[in-house]
Amino acid sequence: MSESTVPDSGPLAVLSAGAAALARAADLDTALAVIVEAGSAAARAPMAAVFGLDAEGGALELLLTLGMDETAVAALDHHVTSDVDHPIHRAALDRTGSLGRDATSSGGRITAADLPLVVASGGGAEHCVGVLSFAWPGSHEVTTDEETLLVGTADLAAAAINAFRTASMVSERAEWLERITHTDALTGLANSRTLARILELEVARAQRQGSEVSVAVFDIDAFTALNVAAGARAGDLVLRQVAAILAENVRLVDTIARAGADEFVLVAPGSAGVTVARRVLDGIARLEAVEGRTVTVSAGVARFPQDGVDAETVLAAARAAVKSAGEPAAIIEAAG
């Protein structure tokens, strides 16, 4: 039995190219190029363009061109994206195409076929993700076979755009979930969950290396009174300002987290906790008053292994130190 072969152009070539693009293309540009080139060759259309439709704003973006010089590409991009009455733009908005549109290009008269790229969405509804336009020089009558090829190519292009957009949204969603899982929404700093994990890791590393870890706890002085007198909005402003000072003054190797309503915790490898705490308090001293109240922060500093045998006890020592502060803007070291 002789081996079957896929022809260089025709329905099987379009199907093969589309399947390969959807299964293995690394990005949308590559997938569209493979699909459109196969469809163009099969329909003997030397020119083609793909416009993507933004689902949120309804704007068109030129994604791919084939067989056009830079001047023609620039002109097409400008006319289609800026004019909602351009046939390609209308094909995207109305989801109605054309298989024999007379047009002009830099090379003279052409015949164009504009196919909206439509995919199914949730609940069985459909939406347009763009337009695929093919063109032939001069006058051209699209045959039934060519129409079948063009529609099939458009469906493959629509599937590619939808697949890569969906993958991108899933990735962005995963990144967002990862971010909110580990950060405090108000300040953008690490949250208490991340603090616990980082502190455990740093203490374990210090145990292996025979080194130290500093833990500094910062409490905003009279924060409850500020919230009561000036309201939650003023309190949130103070929290964001203090968080910004903390983020600006810690080292790259340090971790700063919001661990409570008005509590921030610094995990600093080594013994530099007091030094970093002093920089933070100096920065906060330069803040302007909020609702007529001066913003001050007190700090308690503890070190592993001197002030605690593990992550939990060294953090407790730092919290006990800050609670023992007798005046605002003080830095108290654990007794050891």
Image (spheres, helix red, strand yellow):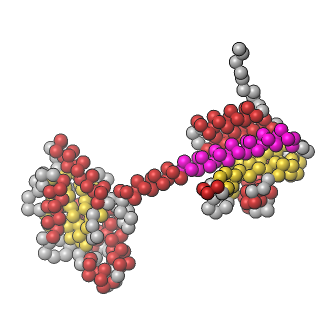
Front-most of 332 and 169?
Answer: 169
Front-most of 217 and 254?
Answer: 217
Q: Quadrant of the N terminus?
A: top right
Q: Quadrant of the C terminus?
A: bottom left
Q: Residue at x 64, y 63 (%)?
A: 57
Magenta: main secondary structure equals helix
Queried whether the magenta region covers residue 17, the answer comes back as no
Q: Is residue 58 visible?
A: yes
| Highlighted magenta segment, given as a residue range | 142-168
Q: Is residue 170 left or right of residue 88?
A: left
**Spot occupied by residue 244 in the image (x, y as percentages of width and height):** 35, 66
To which quarter of the image does residue 289 belong? Answer: bottom left
To which quarter of the image does residue 216 belong? Answer: bottom left
Q: Residue at x 43, y 56 (%)?
A: 177
The total of numbered circles placed on residues is 0
- In this view, the residue farthest toward the left is 335
Q: Residue at x 89, y 48 (%)?
A: 109
Q: Is residue 78 left or right of residue 106?
A: left
**Spot occupied by residue 151 in the image (x, y as percentages of width and height):** 76, 44
**Spot occupied by residue 191 in the image (x, y as percentages of width and height):** 32, 60
- In this view, the residue farthest toward the front is 123
**Spot occupied by residue 231 in the image (x, y as percentages of width and height):** 35, 82
Q: Residue at x 49, y 50 (%)?
A: 171
Queried whether the magenta region covers residue 146, the answer comes back as yes
Looking at the image, is 243 positioned above or below residue 308?
Answer: below
Q: Is residue 21 left or right of residue 140?
A: left
Q: Is residue 106 visible?
A: no
- In this view, the residue farthest toward the top is 1
